[in-house]
Each structure stands twice: as C-alpha cells, then as structure tokens.
Image: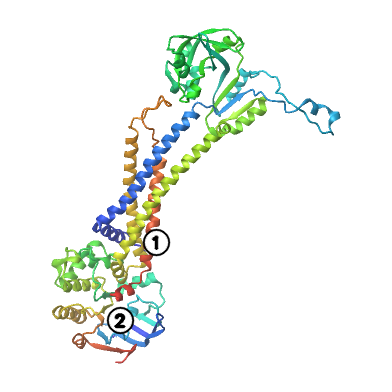
Amino acid sequence: MRVVLEAKHINKYFKKPVLFHVLKDINFQVKKGEFASIMGKSGCGKSTLLYILSTMDTDYKGELLLNNQLVTNQNSNHLSYIRNKHIGFVFQFHYLLSEFSVLENVMLPAKKLAEKSHQEIEHDAIEKLKMLNIAHLAKKRASRVSGGEKQRIAIARALINNPSIIMGDEPTGNLDSHNAENVFNIFKKLSDEQGLSLLIVTHDKDFANKTDRIIQMADGKIIT
Amino acid sequence: MTNWKVILSIAKTHLLTKIKQTAIASLGVTFGIGSYITLVCFMTGLNAMLDNLILNQTPHIHIYNEIEPSEKQPISLYNNADKSFNVVHSIKPKISQKKIHNALPIIDYLEKNKDVRGALPQIKTQIFYIAGSIELGGNLTGINPVDEARLFNMEDYIVEGSAEALQNTDNSILLGIGIAKKMSLKVGDRVQVSPISGGIFPLKIVGFYQSGIADLDAIQSFTNIKTIQRILGKANNYITDINVKLHNIEQAIPLSKKIEQQFKLKAIDIKTANAQFETGTTIRNLITYAVSITLLIVAGFGIYNILNMLIYEKMNDIAILKATGFSGKDVQLIFMSQAMIIGFVGGVLGLLIGLGLANLISTIPFQTEALPTVETYPVNINPLFFIIGFSFAMLSTFLAGYLPSKKAKRIDPVRIIRGQ
C-alpha cells in the first residue's frame, strides 16, 4: 500500500510560558485508503500534532512527507498550495464563511486552485453536495443552516479538490449523536468507496473504535 | 500565482454583506475628498481673485528713469585721490530728465522680443483737479487705452464708459470714481486739470475708473497719450514709463536685468515690486493645503479604523481561508482590495460632491465695492485638484488598508482555530 503521509522524528517545543517538550519523537505513517483516528487525553499533544501534519504549524523539528515528498521547510506559499490541493480539513467549530452561500463555500478552495473552469467547479461542488445529501441547501447562506448540515458542507468543501488525505480536529465534537453517526458514516464511505485516507483527532471512543486504526497518544508520545 | 477573480469576489462579498460599514467607510473618504475639492476650488478661486486684483493691472516689467544719486561721485574720477579716504557729505540726486531717452525705438525693440506680449508707453504726471476754488492733487496717466485694455484688463476697472471712447475722443479723461464723487461729476461733464507747470485744461469725462483700492481711485485718472503730451507741452516722443507684459511671468527677472544693463534704465520686475504680496499668496496657499491635508488624513484614519475592526471580525474567516489553502498574500490582497474599492468609490463620489458644491458656491451672489466686475463668489475648478484629490483618496486608503491587511497576512490560523 502506498504511504500518503509520513512523520519522521517529529519534536515540538512550546517556548511560552515555559519551555515545554510537547511532542517527543513522533514516527508514524498513514497509508492510502486508511481511516485512522488519534486518541488521547486533553493536553497530550494530539491537536498540536495534527496542525503540524496539516502544514499550518511549521515550528517543529523532524521531517514530514506527503505523497513521499518532503514538506518540511518549504516556503509558506508552497505550503498553502499543498494544503489547497492535497489536504482537506474539517474542524470542530470553524466551519464556513458565514457570509457566502453554501455552494460558494464549497467552491472556494477549487477556485483558488484554479485548475478547472467555473462550470466544472460548480458541477463538482453540486456533485459533492448531492453525495452528502445536502444539494438542496446549495443556494442558502452558510449562516442559515444547522450545525450538522454545516459540518457536512465543510466535508464537501474538504473534498472539492480531491485531496490525498482528510484531516479532522474533533469533527464530531460539537454534534449530537445522530449527526456524529452521520458524519462517521460519510467518512467511512469515503474511505471504503473512494480509497480516501483520513486522519481524525477525536475524544469519542465509539467513533474511534469503528475506525481502521487507533493511534493512542499520551504525554507527547505515540503509545500504540 | 494570484487568482484575482477569487480574491475580488471574496472582497466584494465582504463589502456587500457589511454594506452599512462599507457605506460609512466610503462616506468618510467621500466627505474628506468632497470637502477637499470644495475648499481648494473655493480658496484658490478667492486667491486668484485677490491676485488678479493686483497682478492684472501690474506690468511684469516696469521701465522708467529713476531719480537717484550718481553711483560714482566726481572725486572717484580724480586719480590723485586714489589712495586717500574720501567722505562726501550731503549727496544730492543727479539732475536728469524724467523721460526715457529713445523710448519709441526701445518699445519697438521690446515688441520684437519673442518673450514679450506687449510693451506699452505711459506718461505719468502730477496734476490738480480744479473745482471752483478747490484744487485736489492727483495723478494723470497717459496711456494707449485699447492696448491697456487688451494687456492689462483695463476694461474690468472701467465702471462707466469704455477704453475706445478714451482712445477716440480728443481731450478726454477717464476719471477716478473717488474724484468724481468728491466733485459730483458725471460722464459727459468737463473737469479742469492743471499740471504743475501751470495752465488750465478742460477735459471731457468719457468714463469712470474704479480699481477697488479707494486711495488710488481718489487720485488716479487716465487720458490718452496725445492729450497728456499736449497738456505738458512735450513732443510726441516724450514717454516716462514703459510697461512690459510677458508671456511667462518667470522671465520677468532675467529680462528686467538685461534691460537695465542694455539701456541704463530702471527696470523693476513684478516679483520684486510685489514681494510682500507674493508672501501673502504663498501663505494663503499654505493654509489651503494644511486644511485639506488635515481633512484627507482624518478620512484616512476613518478607513484605517473600519478596516481594523473588519479584520477583527473576520479572524475566523481568515483562519478558514488559510486552512483551505489561501496564502497570507491572498488574504492580504483580499483586505487591500476592499480598502482600495472603498477608496475608489468614496473618492469618485467625493469628486462629484466637490464639483457640485463648487458649482453651487459659484452661483452665490457676491458683490463688493472693491471688485466692480465680480458678481458671484469665484471658484477655480481646476482638473489638477481632482487628480490630486483622487490620487490622495487612493493613496490614503492604500496606507489605511496596508497595516491592517499586513496583520491579516500574519495571523496564525492555528492560534485562531485552537483558541476556541
């Protein structure tokens, strides 16, 4: 199986308020089509790790490879491009640009990438929305839809550029159990049917147990 | 690679969804630029009017024979006294003629110079206006009235009658309005004048002259050159002054120096003659610009404030944009283009409002004794002010947008996303 994401000897320190060794020599791989979850207690560094893997946090030691290409120490414009093309992101709270319509929200990353024409992008976006059963919301303002719907729209947005991997920072943390179930099923489907790699940080044991692989963290180290 | 279409569409959405804020920010620019345009048009209009009051009538170079002491006293021509120390007491001015020697050839020569718009002869003399037993002192100047009207806007100051009438009527006079009032004279009456050398000459009043400077109007009158030569009993080459008008006022100083050297005459250029007036103009301009720059800076701060607030409100959006692959530069451009759009819209509106107000001011009646030909407030609608105003609108919004957008560029998405 092809390796999508690989972390080699990743170390990170927080310098404020006191020097603190957050991540201690992290090594792991995510393979293509793998649905992995990261679990651990609050403060164990799992979110910190995720933001390093997402290329948004560049202040670390070690090497990060995406599709076997070194990401570490690339300039910030190139990192933006990598995030745009290869990584889809789903957050706990920060879903959508509230002033834009649902469709525009989904289309934005593809417009930024500008590899397709406007019509193609719009078509793709509607396809993604249909796949997630929310096509009827397309023309609504993003601020006018419910929390569960918002998260599904955010997933559609994460998918628009057909990324190599989807990362989630507690994507179900703010949802009721019904919607959380729903989101999990979507992830599962994407992983099974489209061979998409997923890496999800979660507190939810039920959620994690249903994934292919659980990466357990404690005190800045991977335990299992 | 910058994707302008996306950036502008995001900027547009931000501006349109916060239409109230956008409107307030643009209105800040509009008021700044609008009041700048109005103020500058009005103040430079007034300035130009005040300048014209003096400068229109003033020759660019005034040539005459100065009565002054000889530079070289006879003792310095005496070689034997070379090495001694001379003190000459009670120096008197040299006796010389008032008229300019060879005036007519000099005028011809000046007229041929390509920098010169015209050179006009004048004869200035002191006379008395005689009303019964009262003698009022005054000045009578002999001129070529039609040429004076052409070059020095004489017609603007003739309140009754015309320059042609003065040119064509023998023994006519254009009487200062102050004298006319004192002596209760009207056009068509005759007034008796007496030169210092004696004799009485009745002259027909063909018009009144009002310069706006009361002291001057109470003594100054004009007649044509032939009449004054007859009054003074001089030949027709008797000319005391030559007034030169140039195409470009900046040429006045070098040309006046050249004339002094060439003809051994006194030639005063307009800048030297009106030095304190120039200072006044400079200071008024300075005030105009100080006030307008203040207005523009205040407008600029308004924009800075609103963009700053906008960016605080949009922290979330900035983090999402960055997480989904927009670079810091893209985010900066989004906010910069918002600032520039605000500046553009506000600036154009400001120019229109300024133009409207300036036109409105130019219709307000304004009548004053001092300025017989002015009927409404003067405004100077100069395209340059509009270019400056618009450029400043763009520049100030650029600066006002630059700092907040720079901050947006630097925002760390991780901190925002994790902060909640």
Point out residue B196 in the picture as x, y percentages from the top left corner. Answer: 60, 13
Could you tell me which residue is drawn at 28 percent across and 61 percent down?
A: B10
- Badge 2 and badge 1 both on one subunit: no
Q: For the residue marked with disc 2, what is the amino acid? A: Ser
Point out residue B409 in the picture as x, y percentages from the top left corner. Answer: 37, 66
Displayed quadrant of residue A216: bottom left
Q: Quadrant of the N terminus of chain B?
A: bottom left
The residue carrying mark 1 is: B403
Residue lying furthest bottom: A224
Q: Nearer the viewer, mark 2 or mark 1?
A: 1
Q: Which mark is residue A47?
A: 2
Q: Quadrant of the C terminus of chain B?
A: bottom left
Question: Is B272 above or below relative to A194?
Answer: above
Point out residue A45 in the picture as x, y percentages from the top left corner. Answer: 32, 84
Q: Is residue A187 visible?
A: yes
Point out residue B405 in the picture as x, y percentages from the top left corner. Answer: 36, 62
CA–CA distance in space, label 2 to label 1: 31 Å
Displayed quadrant of residue B43: top left
Q: Secondary structure at mark 2?
A: helix
Could you tell me which residue is drawn at 42 percent across and 12 percent down?
A: B187
Q: Is residue B163 visible?
A: no
Could you tell me which residue is drawn at 36 percent across and 81 percent down?
A: A65
Nearest the eye: A156 or B273: B273
Displayed quadrant of residue B68: top right
